[in-house]
C-alpha cells in the first residue's frame, strides 16, 4: 500500500508543479517564468509523470526488454498526439489569420 501512496504523492507533486509554473507564468504577465523555461520543464515533468505512472501503478520495472518496448510505444503515442495537435492548431491559426488579415485568398472570395 505504501508503494501506491508514494506514487500518488509523486503524481500530485508533478501535476501541482506544472500547474503552478503555468499559473505563475500567466498571472505575472509572462515575466516571472520565461517561455523557454516552460518549453523545457513541462515536457520533463510529463515524462517524469509517465515514469511514475508506469513504475508505481502499472508495476513495469525498467530492466525487461518488453518493458522498454512499452516505454518506447508510450513515447511514440505521446509524440504523435502532441505533435499532431500542435500541427492542427498551427494550421488552423494560419488559415484563420489568412482569412481575416490582408487580402482574402481566391478560394475565399465571394462572387
Image: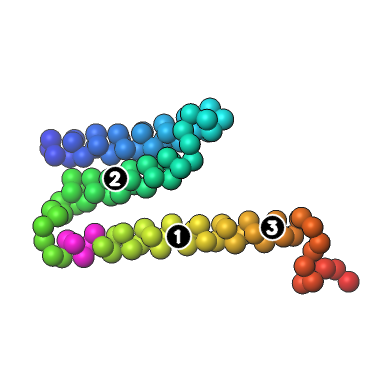
Q: Dot 1 corresponds to which residue?
A: 83
Q: Residue 38's x, y, as percent?
A: 43, 41
| Crowding at mark 3 (Cα within 10 Å: few <14, some 14-19, many 20+) | few
Quarter of the picture holding the C terminus: bottom right
Tell me the residue that label 2 is attached to.
Answer: 49
Q: Is residue 94 above or below residue 34?
A: below
Q: Quadrant of the N terminus?
A: top left
* Residue that appears at 56% across and 57% down: 89
Q: Which residue is mark 3?
A: 96
The residue shown at (63%, 56%) is 93
State the image quarter where residue 91 is shown. bottom right
User: What are the residue bounds of the magenta stretch?
Assistant: 67-71
Of label 1 and label 2, which has the lower sequence position?
Answer: 2
The CA distance from mark 2 to mark 3 is 35 Å
> Nearer the N terminus, badge 2 or badge 3?
2
The answer to whether 103 appears left or right of 46 in the picture is right
- At which x and y percent is residue 49? 29, 45
User: Nearest the camera: 9 or 62?
Assistant: 62
Residue at image x 48%, y 36%? 34
What is the number of the mark on residue 21?
A: none
Q: Magenta region, mostly helix, strand or loop?
A: helix
Q: Is residue 68 magenta?
A: yes
- Dot 1 falls on a residue whose secondary structure is helix
Amino acid at each position: 500500500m505504501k508503494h501506491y501512496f508514494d506514487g500518488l504523492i509523486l503524481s500530485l507533486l508533478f501535476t501541482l508543479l506544472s500547474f503552478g509554473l503555468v499559473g505563475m507564468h500567466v498571472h505575472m504577465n509572462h515575466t516571472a517564468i520565461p517561455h523557454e523555461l516552460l518549453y523545457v520543464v513541462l515536457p520533463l515533468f510529463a515524462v517524469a509523470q509517465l515514469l511514475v505512472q508506469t513504475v508505481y501503478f502499472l508495476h513495469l520495472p525498467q530492466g525487461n526488454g518488453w518493458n522498454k518496448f512499452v516505454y518506447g510505444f508510450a513515447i511514440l503515442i505521446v509524440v504523435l498526439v502532441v505533435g499532431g495537435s500542435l500541427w492542427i492548431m498551427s494550421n488552423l491559426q494560419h488559415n484563420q489569420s489568412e482569412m481575416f488579415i490582408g487580402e482574402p485568398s481566391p478560394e475565399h472570395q465571394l462572387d
